[in-house]
Amino acid sequence: MYDAFLAGDRTRFDSHLHPEVTTWETHLPGPLRTRAELDAYRARRDAAGARPSLDSLSAREMRVDVWGDTAVARYVLVAVAPGGEPEHTRVTDVLRRSATGWAIVHHHAELVRDVT
């Protein structure tokens, strides 16, 4: 998923998201309650030339629990912008399994201000 983000491959990235995904992130304008709301936000951001540019993006300290057709993934996402310091974000993703595979139905990401 994050390889697709770095490659700018929105179709591949979005293949991991359920159409009704809720997205709550520190830097986003309030909770986005559907993929359509997320897409509208991204269209405004990209039109303003503000798509993030990153040298690397990696998930660390991952823990995944699965209960039938539901799973929760928790990890620290480390993003490094060109010439920048690593930013650490705590992420929780809730996933559901369907006939087409696993999809994120809720994504919550909070920037960690003080990394210890």
Image (cartoon, rainbow, N blue to C red):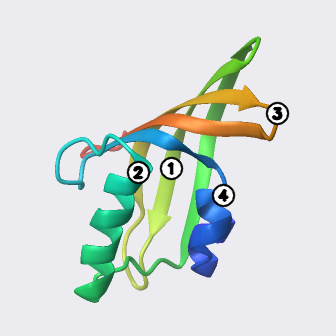
Q: Which residue is mark 4?
A: 1
Residue type indicated by callout 1: Leu
Q: Helix, strand or loop at disc 1?
A: strand
Residue type indicated by callout 3: Ala
* Residue shown at the point (42%, 63%) measured from the top left: 86
Q: Which residue is mark 2?
A: 88
For the residues labelled 2 and 3, the Cα–Cα distance comes to: 34 Å
Q: Which residue is mark 3?
A: 99
Residue type indicated by callout 2: His
Q: Is residue 36 left or right of residue 102?
A: left
Extreme-top residue of the structure = 67
**Of the two numbered discs 2 and 3 in the rendering, the one whose residue sits closer to the viewer:** 3
Reply above or below: 99 against 35.
above
Which image quadrant for residue 33?
A: top left
Which image quadrant for residue 10?
A: bottom right
Disc 1 crowd rating (10 Å Cα; few below 14, some 14-19, many 20+) is: many
Q: Position of residue 24 (x, y in %)?
A: 31, 41
For the residues labelled 4 and 1, the Cα–Cα distance comes to: 12 Å
For the residues labelled 2 and 4, the Cα–Cα distance comes to: 17 Å
Residue type indicated by callout 4: Met
Of labels 2 and 4, earlier in sequence is 4
Q: Which residue is mark 1?
A: 77
Q: Helix, strand or loop at disc 3?
A: loop
Of labels 4 and 1, earlier in sequence is 4
Q: Position of residue 2 (x, y in %)?
A: 62, 61
